[in-house]
Image (cartoon, helix red, strand yellow):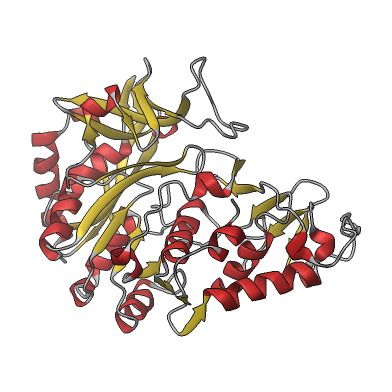
């Protein structure tokens, strides 16, 4: 079933997009139907949806899922597209585009034309190499979305780019549950938080880095959050505890998902990592295991599309996330490709960052490799602190790290900065 067909049979009557205008499902379907009729030549074609307003994006994906052969979601216009893919809006199509519109239908009454299973292509972030197009369909994208009378009452803040996997999950969650959607994906952190406060956002899905930035404003408590979802980065215990104390009544989850693996699994016990017993179970339609290289491996029961995924002989997708088993928990260590090699010793930047942010005077930390002529690489870090006494804090952090880290893991260089940049995905820039 396509998004278009799903909304036609939905039990909800209205939704709200961008927090202002109520939109009936009937009018949304009518608008999507009108787009199909106006652009009937796009039937069976491949279409790239470039950055547009959130209401235009919702209308476009409703119209063209089940109508086009493929949808390429463009978070920006720098990504290369396969030959023959047309860009939406059509007015943005270059003069020399190789795409040629051809009438592939024999009748204009699009309501009578059968739908197809549209392939949705989403781009990886490119943080570990050249971005890849990963294929999904509406069924795989909506598999983990829950709808109920409770979810209908939520007011979702969209912190991610809508055309990326995490952002699309929020858009679909809101759209399929009849909830309100506020686009808070642009502007500085103060502007975005003010928008959330103004529209009384009650549900927020964002990266741990984004939540830490919101905490820096000292205004996050002005929101009455009922649903908090962390994803995209490691959710450490310190942040989970802070959010639990600030919003004791909220449902707090850290979700494991990626563009490559699709929707993974959610952990709702407010503890870092996930129970090791899940490695012997099927969770949310997934089987999990840890490879010999300590990579987390995921195998969906419904295999679907596997192109551009790294899959082993048993059909498990290699997430390239390093994990360790500590007592009864599987704990995330970081990306396999991000390891710092200090004289043959492997250092996971995320593990050191977690230790640094445990200190009460550290708000944000970024750990990175510094070239060394002797050891190859050394550990360095940038710190956003909530104290002006950076020299005193450096001494405290060295003592703090000595108590919790091996010597080769301890940063040799501390740099104090006013802020740390995030990628367009919401993750900390590395």
Q: Which residue sits at x=48%, y=50%?
A: 142
Question: Quick check: can you spot residue 102?
Answer: yes
Left or right: where does residue 261 sit relative to residue 266? right
- Image location (x, y in percent) of residue 205: 35, 59
Q: Which of the pair 379/69 is nearer the observer? A: 69
Q: Which residue sits at x=51%, y=18%?
A: 312
Tell me if residue 102 comes above or below residue 409 in the rendering: below
Q: Which residue sits at x=29%, y=33%?
A: 333
- Image location (x, y in percent) of residue 285: 40, 34
Question: Quick check: can you spot residue 80?
Answer: no
Q: Which of the pair 412/426 is nearer the observer? A: 426
Residue 390, by quadrant, is bottom left
Left or right: where does residue 364 sit relative to residue 180? left
Q: Which residue sits at x=61%, y=73%?
A: 56
Q: Which of the pair 284/218 is nearer the observer? A: 284
Left or right: where does residue 142 sit relative to residue 411? right
Numbered label tally: 0
Tell me if residue 48 comes above or below residue 409 in the rendering: below
- Image location (x, y in percent) of residue 393: 13, 54
- Image location (x, y in percent) of residue 353: 25, 44
């Amino acid at each position: 079933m396509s998004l278009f067909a799903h909304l036609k049979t939905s039990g909800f009557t209205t939704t709200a997009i961008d927090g202002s205008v109520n939109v009936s499902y009937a009018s949304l379907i009518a608008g999507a139907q009108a787009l199909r009729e106006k652009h009937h030549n796009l039937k069976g074609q491949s279409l790239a949806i470039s950055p547009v307003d959130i209401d235009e994006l919702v209308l476009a994906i409703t119209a063209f899922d089940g109508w086009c052969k493929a949808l390429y979601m463009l978070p920006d216009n720098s990504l290369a597209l396969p030959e023959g893919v047309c860009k939406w809006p059509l007015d943005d199509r270059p003069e020399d585009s190789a795409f040629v519109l051809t009438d592939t239908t024999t009748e204009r009454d699009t309501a009578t034309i059968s739908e197809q299973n549209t392939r949705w292509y989403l781009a990886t972030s490119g943080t570990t190499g050249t971005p890849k197009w990963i294929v999904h369909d509406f069924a795989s994208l909506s598999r983990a979305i829950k709808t109920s009378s409770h979810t209908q009452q939520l007011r979702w803040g969209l912190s991610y780019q809508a055309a990326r996997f995490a952002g699309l999950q929020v858009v679909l969650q809101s759209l399929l549950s009849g909830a309100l959607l506020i686009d808070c994906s642009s502007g500085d952190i103060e502007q975005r938080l003010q928008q959330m406060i103004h529209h009384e956002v009650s549900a927020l899905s964002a990266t741990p880095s984004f939540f830490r930035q919101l905490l820096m404003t000292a205004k996050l408590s002005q929101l009455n959050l009922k649903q908090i979802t962390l994803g995209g980065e490691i959710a450490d215990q310190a942040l989970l505890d802070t959010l639990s104390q600030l919003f004791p009544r909220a449902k707090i989850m850290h979700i494991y998902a990626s563009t490559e693996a699709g929707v993974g699994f959610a952990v709702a016990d407010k503890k870092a990592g996930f129970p090791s017993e899940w490695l012997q179970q099927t969770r949310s339609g997934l089987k999990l295991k840890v490879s010999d290289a300590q990579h987390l491996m995921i195998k969906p029961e419904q295999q679907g599309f596997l192109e551009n995924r790294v899959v082993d002989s048993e059909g498990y997708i290699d997430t390239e996330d390093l994990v360790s088993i500590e007592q009864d928990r599987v704990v995330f260590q970081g990306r396999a490709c991000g390891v710092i090699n200090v004289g043959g010793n492997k250092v996971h930047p995320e593990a050191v960052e977690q230790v640094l942010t445990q200190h009460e005077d550290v708000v944000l930390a970024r750990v990175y490799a510094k070239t060394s002529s002797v050891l190859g690489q050394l550990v360095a870090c940038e710190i956003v602190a909530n104290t002006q006494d950076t020299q005193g804090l450096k001494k405290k952090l060295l003592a703090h790290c000595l108590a919790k880290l091996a010597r080769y893991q301890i940063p040799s260089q501390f740099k104090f900065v006013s802020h740390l940049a995030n990628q367009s995905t919401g993750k900390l820039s590395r």
